[in-house]
């Protein structure tokens, strides 16, 4: 049923919990796990670049951290017997980047963590998980940051 499972990750606790579900889902279906980290560059688009005294160094650091994060998830998946690959990209709209990757890569299901914000926090900060789930043509499994019990 699923040949390609996507795990968008930001390194958060919610993403870590989602990783466990994504690896399990991929393993059960003999699917490949695609791990995606999107560096949000929207702040550079909203103001003068001079606000970032050393943007090039900052961008390099963000890419290095993203590759380290994705690499660790890919290795964990491989240790569990799952075929996995990772991608890091920089875009100014994270939900659109994820949805674009879903179409481009032929993803069958998205597994992602949700921070569970509500009220004003969700309104002000937005919800990547909500925007992806509303915009996706493929099924989306949302995993809460904390286990309920």
Image (cartoon, helix red, strand yellow):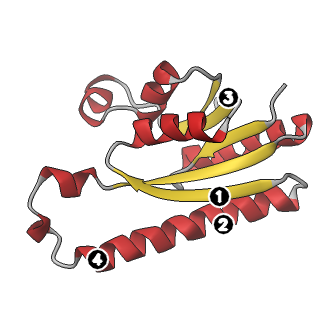
Task: State which tag comes first along the sequence, 1 or 4.
Answer: 4
Check contact, mark 2 vs mark 3: CB within 8 A: no
Residue 140 location (% of width, % of height) = 62, 26
Q: Earlier in the sequence, mark 2 or mark 3?
A: 2
Task: Place residue 47 in its image quadrant.
Answer: bottom left
Residue contact between numbered discs 1 and 3, judged by CB atoms under 8 Å: no
Label 1 packing within 10 angstroms: few (<14), some (14-19), many (20+): many
| Mark sitting earlier along the chain (3/4) | 4
Residue 18 is labelled as none
The x, y position of residue 114, in whole percent, is: 52, 35
**Label 4 belongs to which residue?**
56
Q: CA distance from mark 1 to mark 3?
A: 32 Å
Q: Does residue 144 appear anywhere in the picture? A: no
Q: CA distance from mark 2 to mark 1?
A: 7 Å
Gap between marks 2 and 4 measured at Cα: 22 Å
* Residue at x-position 90% and y-position 36%: 28
Name the residue tied to disc 1: 86
Q: CA distance from mark 2 to mark 3?
A: 31 Å
Q: Secondary structure at mark 2?
A: helix
Q: Nearer the viewer, residue 105 or 65?
A: 105
Q: Residues within 10 Å of mark 2 (few under 14, many from 20)?
A: some
Task: State the SS at label 3.
Answer: loop
Indicate which disc, 2 or 1, sits on the residue closer to the N terminus.
2
* Residues at marks 1 and 4, CA–CA distance in whole angstroms: 23 Å
Name the quadrant of the C terminus. Answer: top right
Residue name at image x 61 percent, y 61 percent? 70
Q: Which mark is residue 71?
A: 2
- Residue assigned mark 3: 149
């Amino acid at each position: 049923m699923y040949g390609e499972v996507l795990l968008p990750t930001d390194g958060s606790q919610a993403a870590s919990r989602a990783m466990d579900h994504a690896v399990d889902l991929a393993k059960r279906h003999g699917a490949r796990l695609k791990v995606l980290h999107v560096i949000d560059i929207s702040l550079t688009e909203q103001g003068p670049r001079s606000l970032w005294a050393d943007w090039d160094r900052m961008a390099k650091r963000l890419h290095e951290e993203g590759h380290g994060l994705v690499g660790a998830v890919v290795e964990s998946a491989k240790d569990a017997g799952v075929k996995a690959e990772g991608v890091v990209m920089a875009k100014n709209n994270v939900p659109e980047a994820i949805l674009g990757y879903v179409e481009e890569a032929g993803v069958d299901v998205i597994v992602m963590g949700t921070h569970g914000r509500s009220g004003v926090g969700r309104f002000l900060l937005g919800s990547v998980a909500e925007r992806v789930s509303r915009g996706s043509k493929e099924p989306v499994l949302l995993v809460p940051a904390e286990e309920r019990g």
